[in-house]
Image (spheres, rainbow, N blue to C red):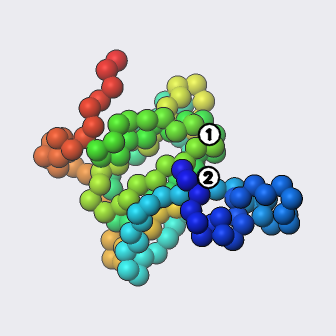
Amino acid sequence: MSENAQHAHHGHGTGDADGPSWTRAAKMIQDASPVVVPEGASAMTIHVEWEPGDPGTPPHRHSGPAFGYVIKGAVRFELEGEPERVVEAGGTFWEPGGDAIHYQDGNALSDEKTEFVVTMMCAPGKPMLELVGEAELKERAHLRAPRPTA
C-alpha cells in the first residue's frame, strides 16, 4: 500500500532516520482508498482469535468499512469480486462495507492459532455484522471470483 501525501507531509511513516523520534515512531501499514464512512457511523475495534483450522465467520457483510491487522498466524480472506488470499502476520486487509459480501476470514493454518484486530465502522441503526443467507449467495454467485482448484 502506498503512503498518502497527508501522512508523508506530517512525517508519520517517512522513515526519516535523521528526524525527531516522532517521525520514526509510526509506520504506514495500510492506506485504503476510496473509503466511504456512513454518516453518523460508530466504530468498534475487536480482537479475533481463531483456533487452528477454524473457518471463521460465515459469509457476511458490514454496513461500513472494516480495517484489519493480522497479529499472529494467517487469515484466509475473501471478499466478493476478489480472489481468495492469505494474509500473514504483519499484513493488513480491508473491506469497503455496504453491499459487498465477505466470504472468508478464517484461520488459514491447521496447526496454529491465528489472531487479528479489526476496526469496523457501522451505519446508525444497522448491525455491525449481517450474515448472508444461502438464497442470496446463490443469486450473487456470478460476482464471486473463481475458486482455487485443489
Tell whether label 1 touches label 2 (CB within 8 Å): no
- The x, y position of residue 76, in whole percent, is 45, 36
Q: Nearer the viewer, residue 78 or 135?
A: 78
Marks 2/1: CA–CA distance: 12 Å
Give the residue at mark 1. Answer: 89
* Sequence-first tag of 2 and 1: 2
Residue closest to the eye, 98 or 35: 35
Q: Residues within 10 Å of mark 2 (few under 14, many from 20)?
A: few
Query: Which of label 2 and label 1 is nearer to you?
Result: 2
Mark 2: which secondary structure? loop
Task: Give the labeled residue for mark 2.
Answer: 29
Name which residue type carries label 1. Ala
Q: Residue at x 41, y 81 (%)?
A: 40
Label annotation for residue 77: none
Side of 22 relative to 90 (left or right): right
Disc 2 marks a residue whose amino acid type is Ile
Would residue 62 be seen by someone viewing this image from the given angle?
no
Q: Can you see residue 83?
A: yes
Tell me: 78 left or right of 22.
Answer: left
Where is residue 59? Give x, y as percent.
32, 46
